[in-house]
Image (tube, rainbow, N blue to C red):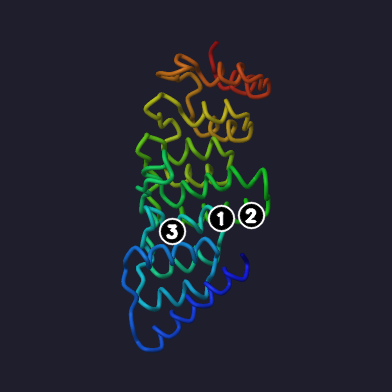
């Protein structure tokens, strides 16, 4: 299996080199897109640089997935920097068919999801993803972007517990009381998931502890009630200190 993979890789790379030296350009079609995204998944910087030099669009998509999304999720810092330098659109959204439920997500959404996963499985990778997330915000990403189901960066980051990104988003002016269509705020999400330091940060910046979930299983719940349900006594105490009502 490994031998076949490397043979395939060698063939593709040889074709790219020959095409490049002959002054040709790669067409931005489905085949090129798949090859480019696969190279991004493998973090193959050499092949990616070559393909970009041959005219491949840095925003080319394979079933809605961009190289920047792949790089952000996997913590590929060098690849992220390369794609941004080549003009990759940081606000481009995912609209594919394979990753159901992710419609409208940007590279930053992918980074947040990657952080939430890897902080449990690979802390070093999670740290790299965190750096990428902060970089994307510093590069001017639209902090008010929403997914198709109404999630924004603050609610998703509060779920992941990435305090540094929440602080950065607040500094950039994001609404701390933004409410998703189902009525959840970032404070509710952080309280429900037991992220004490995130709850504290949000409260310090004006998050309202008395807003209620609008619909669904937790309809009528406040951040306090959600924390009580999950048994987070330290968060319950903190919320009450900031005026949360029973």
> In the rendered image, which quarter contains the C terminus?
top right
Residue ID for mark 3: 139
Q: Secondary structure at mark 2?
A: helix
Q: Is residue 173 above or below residue 52?
A: above
Q: Is residue 91 above or below residue 101?
A: below
Mark closer to the chain start, 2 or 1: 1
Residue ID for mark 1: 74
Specify the farthest residue to the top: 246
Q: Secondary structure at mark 3?
A: loop
Viewer-proximal residue among 47 and 106: 47
Q: Is residue 40 above or below residue 118?
A: below
Specify the farthest residue to the bottom: 22
Residue ID for mark 2: 125
Mark closer to the chain start, 1 or 3: 1
Q: Is residue 125 above or below residue 245?
A: below
> In the rendered image, which quarter contains the N terminus?
bottom right
| Marks 2/1: CA–CA distance | 7 Å
């Amino acid at each position: 299996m490994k031998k076949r993979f490397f043979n395939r890789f060698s063939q593709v790379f040889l074709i790219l080199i020959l095409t490049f030296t002959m002054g040709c350009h790669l067409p931005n079609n489905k085949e090129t897109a798949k090859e480019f995204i696969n190279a991004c998944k493998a973090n193959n910087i050499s092949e990616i640089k070559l393909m970009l030099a041959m005219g491949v669009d840095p925003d080319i998509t394979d079933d809605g997935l961009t190289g920047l999304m792949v790089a952000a999720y996997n913590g590929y810092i060098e690849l992220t920097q390369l794609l941004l330098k080549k003009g990759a659109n940081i606000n481009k959204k995912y609209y594919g068919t394979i990753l159901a439920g992710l419609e409208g997500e940007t590279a930053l959404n992918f980074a947040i999801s990657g952080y939430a996963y890897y902080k449990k499985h690979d802390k070093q990778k999670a740290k790299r993803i965190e750096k990428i997330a902060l970089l994307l915000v510093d590069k001017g990403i639209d902090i008010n972007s929403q997914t198709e189901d109404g999630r924004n960066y603050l609610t998703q980051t509060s779920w992941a517990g990435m305090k540094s990104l929440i602080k950065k988003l607040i500094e950039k002016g994001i609404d701390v009381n933004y409410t998703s269509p189902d009525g959840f705020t970032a404070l509710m999400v952080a309280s429900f998931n037991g992220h004490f330091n995130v709850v504290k940060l949000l409260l310090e910046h004006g998050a309202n502890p008395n807003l209620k979930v609008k619909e669904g299983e937790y309809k009528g719940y406040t951040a306090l009630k959600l924390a009580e349900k999950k048994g987070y006594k330290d968060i319950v105490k903190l919320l009450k200190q900031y005026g949360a009502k029973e």
